[in-house]
């Protein structure tokens, strides 16, 4: 796991990002409504999983904002 915060600032109790890092994007799980941290490189169409309820999610984009939606079940 890569440290995204400057360790000297963390020692002082402040979350100060390292130079050149992008901020994480937050979204809410549509099932359990917990806040999910998306990587700064997250794009619409990618898949993921909620860390709390385990729901399979798909990242979508509406009006420039990333959102999470339940992954559509594929019919077999």
Image (tube, rainbow, N blue to C red):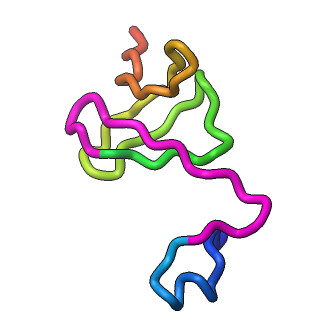
37 with respect to 20 (left or right) = left
- Taking 46 as reference, is 62 above or below it? above
Name the quadrant of the C terminus: top left
Q: Position of residue 46 (x, y in %)?
A: 58, 29
Asked if residue 67 shows in the view, the reply is yes
Relative depth, front residue between 66 and 2: 66
- Taking 20 as reference, is 42 above or below it? above
Q: Which residues are magenta?
A: 16-34
Relative depth, front residue between 31 and 20: 20
Disc tally is 0
Q: Is residue 31 magenta?
A: yes
- Taking 29 as reference, is 3 above or below it? below
Q: Position of residue 33 (x, y in %)?
A: 23, 37
Relative depth, front residue between 17 and 73: 17
Relative depth, front residue between 57 and 18: 18
**Residue plotted at (53% across, 90% down):** 11
The image quadrant that residue 42 belongs to is top right
Q: Is residue 15 magenta?
A: no
Spot the residue most to the right: 20
Name the quadrant of the N terminus: bottom right
Asked if residue 1 shows in the view, the reply is no
Q: Position of residue 48 (x, y in %)?
A: 48, 38
**Residue plotted at (59% across, 83% down):** 9
The image quadrant that residue 68 belongs to is top left
31 with respect to 35 (left or right) = left
**Residue plotted at (27% across, 51% down):** 52
Spot the residue most to the top: 75
**Residue plotted at (59% across, 71% down):** 16
User: Magenta-highlighted stretch: main secondary structure?
Assistant: loop
């Amino acid at each position: 796991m890569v440290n995204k915060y400057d360790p000297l600032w963390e020692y002082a109790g402040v979350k100060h990002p390292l130079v050149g890092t992008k901020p994480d994007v937050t979204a809410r799980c549509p099932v359990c409504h917990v806040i999910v941290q998306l990587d700064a490189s997250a794009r619409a169409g990618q898949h993921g999983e909620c860390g709390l309820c385990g729901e399979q999610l798909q990242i979508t984009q509406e009006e420039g904002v990333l959102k999470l939606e339940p992954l559509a079940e594929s019919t077999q």
